[in-house]
Amino acid sequence: MPRGQKSKLRAREKRRQAQIETQRSKSQRSRRAPPTTNTSAGVSCTRSDEGAKNQDEERPSTSQASASTDDPHRTPLDQKAILLVEFLLRKYNMRDPITKQDMMRQVIKKHKAHFHVILKKASELMVLAFGIDVKEVDPIRHRYVLVSKLQRTSDDRLRGEKIMPKTGLLMTILCVIFMKANCAAEEDIWEVLNVMGIYADKKHYIYGDANKLITEDFVQERYLEYRQVPNSDPPRYAFLWGPRAHAETSKMKVLEFLAKLHDTVPSAFPAWYEEALRDEEERARARFASLLRIGTTANVPSGVNLGSLSQL
Amino acid sequence: MWNKDRPVPSYMQGSTRRVGIMTDVHRRFLQLLMTHGVLEEWDVKRLQKHCYKVHDCNATVEKLEDFINNINSVLESLYIEIKKGVTEDDGRPIYALVNLATTSVSKMASDFAENELDLFRKALELIIDSETGFASSTNILNLVDQLKGKKMRKKEAEQVLQKFVQHKWLVEKEGEFTLHCRAILEMEQYIRETHPDAVKVCDLCHGLLIQGQSCETCGIKMHLPCVAKYFQSNSEPRCPHCNDYWPHEIPEVFDPEKEREAGISKSNKKPLRSRQH
């Protein structure tokens, strides 16, 4: 007699279970055992010798592939998100922003159409596991930075290489001021910031109240000067470099920043380059003069740059 | 809003189905560990205490091993873990965040160009094949013509080697290169699979061996810290395999207390005989 539906279903279910079991046990063996941190011989924890043998240099390991059959919740997009997390973690210490292009080329590959979903999943994983936000700082050229959600403390023993988003904004403003003959109208500044998605009347998710930041905070910290344009009615305002900006950075450094953003060199902007060179000469002369006054080089710290701007 | 003490969602749970709780203490710990790349155990303990202090002053600081196992149970589904190892030359316990999913050189792929990756592979081969675990700068640079990808000049290759040192993949000593302890932690699996015949293994712990001592009679090799522990206070050290007299100087077992008291900095410390074989 032919087998009834129920019997066929039961058999199919049994087969599927058996398949999952063998795959699960296979993946258990191919996945490395969690490391034991107790030191029996006081040496490095070794993974079991039966590690996955068939790993190809270019492709992700088979333990990952078998884990996907292990866990029915994990879709190919989930797997891509996990790979993207690895990619982002490697970029965590780097100063350069991460570009969408890099992510596409190195991680997303053939899943290009699903970039946003994959990025969203990866971002959520980054927040949950590491407390790190993936922020788009340049919506036009699609550049992202990694920002810790946790408050920085002075004891964090971080090396000075961490990306400081506020510093990037400040450098941009100093740049605009320099390009506008060292005095930029408030409208000019906002024109540039608006292009970056930063508005005076909207709270920005990195910079918060941007208007307060640039007209009050940076001014208080003496990085910027915010002055009323003389004889302006209704009153208009302009920005200039503050004394701290002059002390901690230079026109040449700001020009280098600009050049880097445009993938070029400072000398590509001849007029500004000239001015920056003259500024450098002035500074060198001033340093030399102060050296003579003091008398010995031992008293003068080399490179007077202090503060956050010196890290750029 | 982001709830910082939220238990981890099911798709992130490991196969053991334990619910790992990640708090800001653990997240800060991970961020700082990543920033440093690789840390010695003493620094890791300090880091852990610091993270507790910042977020949760009153909680008792969990034992480091449990703390790390908890984190690893959560990260398991991302194929990431905090791995503990020991430096080959002087037996210091070290920790690094390693990714198990991709096989090695692809870990470096996002930071290096094709020809640079190939240079690393060539250096790695020389290191593995060498008697001492070190490959000379000259020998590595002589291989630049064989690299895949864009042509690289020797001058350029020298800088790439320095880049590897900066990124903690290689270590340089007197013009010779060996693997950084972090590289061994991350790449052990990859190295064993891609060089199954050439790779050396410690007779005691069975871990990958780059530097170590070998028995002159039967040829077995052991890590310096393994030798130190095995022959501790043994006046007549003998090979565990062939029982012949062990001809090399027995290094001291690493003692973190002694080191801190003496205030010896790593850079001042004389490296143990790392070239014995």
Image (spheres, coloured by chain):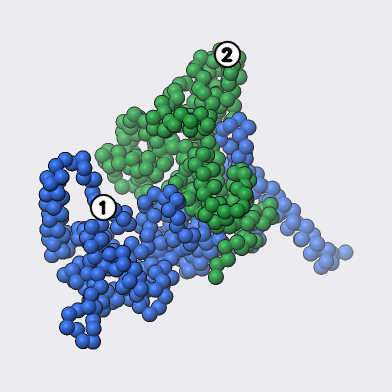
* Chain ID, blue in image: A
Which chain is indicated by disc 2? B
Left or right, A67 with reference to A131: right
Type of residue at label 2?
Ser
**Viewer can see residue A10:** yes
Q: Secondary structure at mark 2?
A: loop
Q: Which residue is mark 2?
A: B235
* Chain ID, green in image: B
Q: Residue A38, how many percent across, how many down?
A: 62, 37
In the picture, residue B226 is in which quadrant? top right
Q: Are marks 1 and 2 on the same chain?
A: no
Q: Which residue is mark 1?
A: A305
**Residue in the picture at 40% in, 78% down:** A202
Please identify the residue farthest to the right as the structure is shown: A1
Type of residue at label 1?
Asn
Q: Is residue B115 above or below residue A245?
A: above
Q: Is residue B139 above or below residue A72?
A: above
Q: CA distance from mark 1 to mark 2?
A: 58 Å
Q: Is residue A224 above or below residue B241?
A: below
Q: Residue B73, how many percent across, how many down?
A: 62, 51
